[in-house]
Amino acid sequence: MSAIRLKDVTLGYEGHPAVHHLDGTFEDGSLTAIVGPNGSGKSTLLKGIVGMLQPLTGSIERAPGATIAYLPQSADIDRTFPATVADLVALGHWRRRGLFAAITGADYREVEEALATVGLTGFENRPLDTLSGGQLQRALFARVMLQDADTILLDEPFTAIDEKTVIDLIELVRRWHAEDRTVIAVLHDAEMVKAVFPRTLLMAREPVCWADTDKALKAENLLKARRMTEAWDEHAPWHENGHGHGGGH
Ligand SMILES: Nc1ncnc2c1ncn2[C@@H]1O[C@H](COP(=O)(O)OP(=O)(O)OP(=O)(O)O)[C@@H](O)[C@H]1O
């Protein structure tokens, strides 16, 4: 069974294509990394899968009734919003409860359990703008937990956060995989991809290779991805070793 099927999809903005020829399947329960040079269309693909962007051509099929949780890049998250950690995490309930439903005692216990799982016990009433980057990312993972979705999309979830948080959150990703959820994450750290993600989609404005990770990350494919992106944009930076992310976000 496939969780998400891409059929010759082109995605873009205001009629201008950003990525082409996306064709393939994220199998149900698969754990896939999306990697590629800056500007290669990774975030755009996640936005297409979650339905924020409609394909310019082609189609994206999702299993009927399947639910998707989406964690955008932290740069896209407004931390100045006047809310507490518990408010943020409780939003994970909205699909089940509706946006304006009162939070019940059981809901609150779930929030506390999720916070305990991500190591944020006692942070319930902390305003979001007092959190470190790592703490905010832990809270956002707790919200994803509460969403209880079949498919989980993570856009650069480990960028610019401390190592201990990365280790703890990777454990959560492994747990979601063990629970047979479909997990797709945009990542820049090739070593982490090799260690944790069995499948990889390497992109350069179109798929370069979508396969088991060892195959997808072969040197020849990485070189091809770099050349293809440079051909599209002479100035696109590229971080093959996966450390750091340049001046991107
Ligand atoms: N909202 C937008 N409006 C117009 N163009 C956009 C928008 N968002 C992204 N793009 C363009 O689409 C292309 C793909 O961008 P995208 O953010 O998907 O790449 P990426 O692989 O996620 O990059 P990075 O690794 O830097 O996050 C780029 O040329 C980018 O400038």
Image: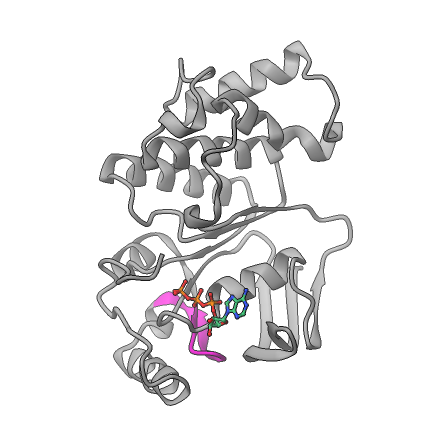
Q: Residue at the bottom extreme?
A: 231
The residue drawn where x is 35% and y is 52% is 196
- Quadrant, the C terminus: bottom left
Left or right, 112 with respect to 27, comes to left
Could you tell me how many numbered marks the image carries?
A: 0
The residue drawn where x is 52% and y is 55% is 30
Q: Main secondary structure of the magenta part?
A: strand
Q: Is residue 96 above or below residue 7?
A: above
Q: Is residue 90 above or below residue 38?
A: above
Find residue 180 and report its image quarter: top right
Q: Is residue 5 above or below residue 72?
A: below
Left or right, 102 with respect to 6, comes to right
The residue drawn where x is 62% and y is 41% is 149
Q: Is residue 62 magenta?
A: no
Picture coordinates of residue 214 (x, y %)? Answer: 33, 69
Give the magenta-colored segment's residue range: 201-213
- Quadrant, the N terminus: bottom right
Picture coordinates of residue 44 (x, y %)? Answer: 54, 65
